Image (cartoon, helix red, strand yellow):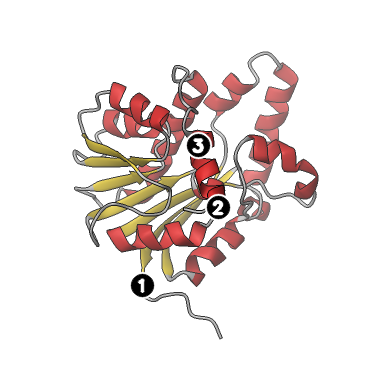
Amino acid sequence: MSQASNQISATYNEQYLNESSEWRDLGGKQKSSNIIDLCSKHSSKKTLDIGSGDGAVLSWLDKRKFTDNLSSLEISDSGIAAITARNLASLKEVKKFDGYHIPYDEKSFELATCSHVIEHVEHPRLLLREIARVSDYQYFEVPIDFSFFVDEKIKHYLDYGHINIYTPALFKFLLKSEGFEVIDERFLFTSDELIEFQFKNNFKRKVIQKIKNLIVSITPYKKIKPNAYSVLCKHNGNDLSIF
């Protein structure tokens, strides 16, 4: 890893020392629903989750019996400790990795899931190639942080660790240029449950957010500025080719 990558790894190493928050759990609930929605037609006996954080998504996949053979990769020691402490029945193993090199053989998994990770990755194409190498199908979800004035909010996004900003089209461009074929996609909006939690002390903001999501979700603009974007892919075996 580069010096910058080592710094990123060190930054996340203690990210989950505190107890798992209700916010992460509710987020994990919605993210697991998104995975099941897109991947249910492609049953997976072996699934690898990359960048599992504190295991909130894994926990909900386990509760919902998505598969009986889950494996996890996580960059932080605190995340691995939190995942291990959950004692998930379907989780076969959790390994620490450096954010790029996946310690499994080619096509070891029928499905790889990578939810809200790519926006944190210093060199996303390197990780995407590794994910394609070890899996038959790939699921990705990214937040849609783009706005015309995103450059004025750089501290805000860096405070969340978001170092890459996408629209759905820009993320699809990245995937397609790396040889991923898009099988299915979803334009996602924050659940009412999460909105209720986020703005539980601010009724006006809560109502505004729900109305905003409703309006955007029923217009063509939903394909430009949803809250998040998810996609199910299958790599075509071709490397990046330019010129």
Label 1 crowd bin: few (<14), some (14–19), many (20+), radius 10 Å: few
Confirm or deny contact between disc 1 and disc 3 (CB under 8 A): no
For residue 236, the mark is: 1
Residue placed furthest toward the front: 3
Q: Which mark sits nearer the N-terminus, 1 or 3?
A: 3
Q: Which mark sits nearer the N-terminus, 1 or 2?
A: 2
Q: Is residue 82 left or right of residue 218?
A: left
Quarter of the image where one finds residue 94: top left
In the image shown, does 136 or 151 lie closer to the viewer?
Answer: 151
In the image shown, does 110 or 96 lie closer to the viewer?
Answer: 96
Q: Label 3's element?
A: helix
Disc 3 designates what residue? Answer: 10
In the image shown, does 116 or 16 lie closer to the viewer?
Answer: 16
Disc 2 designates what residue? Answer: 122
Q: Is residue 32 left or right of residue 171?
A: left
**Residue appearing at x 52%, y 57% in the figure:** 123
Q: Is residue 187 visible?
A: no
- Three-letter amino acid code at the position of disc 2: Glu
Confirm or deny contact between disc 2 and disc 3 (CB under 8 A): no
Q: Label 2's element?
A: loop
Measured Cα–Cα span from mark 1 to mark 2:
24 Å
- Three-letter amino acid code at the position of disc 3: Ala
Residue 48: image x %, image y %? 30, 47
- Figure check: 56 above or below 139: above
Q: Label 1's element?
A: loop
Measured Cα–Cα span from mark 1 to mark 3:
34 Å
Callout in the foreground (1, 3): 3
Callout in the foreground (2, 3): 3
